[in-house]
Image (spheres, rainbow, N blue to C red):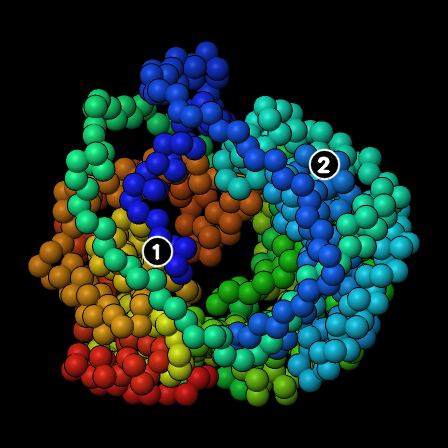
Amino acid sequence: MADLDAPSLADVRDWFRDIDGPNNAVLVLAGDVDAATARPLVEKYFGDIARGPQNVPAEASVPVLAAPTSVVMKDRVATTTVSRYWPMPGLLDRQLVALDIGGSVLGGLASSRLDRILVRDEKIAVSVSAGLYPNQRVGIFFAQATVKPGVDVALVERRLDEIIAPYIAEGPTADEVARAATREAGGRIRALEQAGGFGGKAVTLAEGEVLAFGDSDFYRKTLANYATTTPAEVRAAMAQWLGNPAFRVRLEPGERPPYQESKAVAQKASKGSDRIRVTKKREIPPLGGMQALDFPEVSHVALSNGVQLHYAQRSAVPVTQLALTFDAGYAADAPTARGLQNMTLALLQEGTTTRTSQQIAEQEERLGAEISASGSADRSTVGLSALSANLGPSLDLLADIVRNPAFAPAEVERVRSQTLTAIAQQLKDPNGLASRALPVLLYGAAHPYANTGIGDERTVQGFTRDNLVAFQQSWLRPDNLEIFVVSDRPLEEIRAELDRRFGQWQAPTAGRGQKQFTAAPSRPASPKIVLIDRPQSPQSVIVGGQITPVDPRSDVTALTSANDVIGGNFLSRINMDLRETKGWSYGVRGGLSLNEKAVPYVVSAPVQADRTADSIMALATNYRDFLTVKGTTDEELTRILANNIQQLPGRFETSAAVLQGMITNDFLGRPDDYFERLAGLYRAQTRSTLDEAIRAAVTPESFVWVVVGDAAKIRPQLEKLGMPIEEIQPR
């Protein structure tokens, strides 16, 4: 922390003046603009900024350790992770692509060698990874394995080294290299669909200009390298750099060394030459006219067996995004079987009646496809992102995974171990502790939403193969399914392809699952604090919640806009107060979850431990004031509505975003053109509509405040608030 405490305001100011001059900057404009329009504007607003010192990037050669170096670290982790690190060349070296492919084959792909040997075959690790952290001149290559609880750490370390050594010597196969390169190309094609964002067009062009010294075609050359890199090049690069001594890290369960806080000394007001002088007032340019959102037209048809297909066409990239949504979710779990949905979904890609988990992973990679399975409170979804040229075989793989899961006993035990390790890690993490506690406090233990999705140790330990098969047969079935697709391919082609794989799928004879919803308990008339002790925590995590009477299918425009004022974005009252004004938190948020049967309102605030009670009081005061006497201001109304309206055209620039919009509209019973109507709904709002909506939904007295932190330090603070305090054990 001493390094962070040392710089003065002048040091920071001078650094920016020396480094961030216009002659060291690259400006990329990507989107609906041409050079003839853009250049005069750039000249007008940036052209008169004076040049700064010329930055001469430091040269850096790749360092090599003289001998292997080892370190043991401790943290509140559920199990031990062992890692190996090697210095390697940077972004401009052709070997970087070879090393990236080599890392993917070793531990980055789902079919990787470390996955196959340590996780699937020997089952001594719950997860593995390998890859690189590339910088411009040098980078870091890593390989690591997270030890399965109960397994000897020394055994995993030895096997990790024993797998890496022959791989370095022999190199990958041609099929492994092709799969890694295809996955990389597919990922870059998907990323380039968006103009901005991480990996989008703007960032991609800027990286080439800055890091490749003015080569905006750097991304094309890099993709060409992936297409032409050979197994021999990978072997040579791996041998050259991973043949050097490694830096070895063992991260094991235990307590960290004593935590050193930053001094956090407020800077004195600048005087004299330290004061920043404004020599020219620069007016903020007026906003131009915004194009209205043009959401793609959505078509609705049925497969031969009646399964509903919802389709929209987007042609920006040759990709098909697809979601199979089942009316299940973790609300389908019985109170005695919390986590069953999660474990069932986790096993879908771990083997079918004709393919092993390894074969599934390899085929997915060959096709450049991405298949995933996930669950929310109300829906279970199996997703596919396919390169449209490979759509047919990608759908073959998807259909096999969904329709013919094997639930092989060995795979069940492996996924069970991974799930139990994840639960154990949640119980080490303050946010995990809070998120596991709040649902039961809000809904009561028997309610379908009193569930975090992953389950608990007792229930997961007890799941049998029959339980998993029964869940799949009851819930993941064609009479409980809707399909959503966004593709560059025409509807009739998509419908025919899906009909071949899913149109003849018939429901099991056993009845479809039924969720057992009961009424949520009444929200409390006064606030209370539930404390979970986590000794030696430098921060406390505060999560407050209450159940609202909101109908999720109603018009919530006024309500969500009002929440933007109090808790929904960076400029919200609670974030500006606790983060910007008081400096007690890095970020505070509050918001609604539009579940099918109940809508909770939840506030999340990680804060410094010595301000735990003060933070709860500040949150309570902000909400009480907003919900009673200090409602929405004119400035807040104007800013919030302008932001929500103006961001609409950019919300759906990717096929994945359109797909999610379609799913949300269907789930909440909205019309297909809802997002096109939304700007009009925003414009109709007033201060009164916002205040009335949030005051009807949220009451300041009904929050249950879950606090995770060092009870010995924070309980005396909390007792001064005058709220009842209940201390509970982690769930």
Residue type at the position of mark 1 = Asp
Q: Is residue 92 visible?
A: yes
Query: 495 or 544, which lies in front?
Result: 544
Q: Which residue is mark 2?
A: 93
Give neighbour class at mark 1: few <14, some 14-19, many 20+ (Cα, 10 Å): few
Please provide percent x and percent y for residue 520.
Answer: 34, 78
Give the structural element (helix, strand or loop) at label 1.
helix
In the rendered image, the vertical position of residue 242 relative to residue 416, given as above or below: above
Give the structural element (helix, strand or loop) at label 2.
loop
Which numbered marker is on residue 360?
Answer: none
Quarter of the figure with the N terminus: bottom left
Please provide percent x and percent y for residue 4.
Answer: 38, 55
Q: Which residue is mark 1?
A: 5
Please provide percent x and percent y for residue 316.
Answer: 59, 31
Query: 25 or 723, which lies in front?
Result: 25
Please provide percent x and percent y for residue 26.
Answer: 48, 26
Residue type at the position of mark 2 = Asp
Q: Residue at x 78, y 43 (%)?
A: 98
Query: 459 or 184, which lies in front?
Result: 184
Q: CA distance from mark 2 to mark 1?
A: 37 Å
- Between tags 2 and 1, which lies in front? 1
